[in-house]
Amino acid sequence: MANLTEKELSALNDLLSSEELEIKKFHMLSDAATDPALKQKFCSIADMHQRHFNTLYQHLG
């Protein structure tokens, strides 16, 4: 992996924070939903953001 600049690390940190917020938001929406199809859609979106988070996180290691 190439060394990241401070600016790149800062941008990566911002992206990770955004993805983490989206994961929490869609899990919360899923927990609150009563419609099974909507609950599943929210879980699916949370999973997508989790994959984004994991991909971004790999750039730190």
Image (cartoon, grey):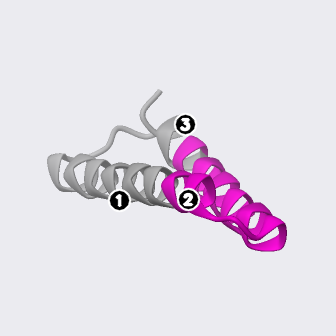
Mark 1: give few (<14), some (14-19) or many (20+) Cα within 10 Å: few
Q: Quadrant of residue 25?
A: bottom left
Query: What residue lies at 63% left-to-right and 65% top-to-bottom?
Result: 33
Q: Residue furthest top?
A: 61
Q: Which residue is mark 2?
A: 32
Answer with left or right where residue 59 lies relative to residue 54: left
Question: Given this view, does label 2 or label 1 mark the residue nearer the observer?
Answer: 2
Q: Which residue is mark 3?
A: 58
Q: Quadrant of residue 21?
A: bottom left
Q: Which mark is residue 6?
A: none
In the structure shown, which secondary structural element does the residue marked by tag 1 occupy? helix
Q: Which residues are magenta?
A: 27-54
In the structure shown, which secondary structural element does the residue marked by tag 2 occupy? helix
Q: Mark 2 or mark 3: which comes first in sequence?
A: 2
Answer with left or right where residue 16 lies relative to residue 37: left
Q: CA distance from mark 2 to mark 1?
A: 21 Å
Q: Residue furthest left?
A: 6
Q: Is residue 48 above or below residue 35?
A: above
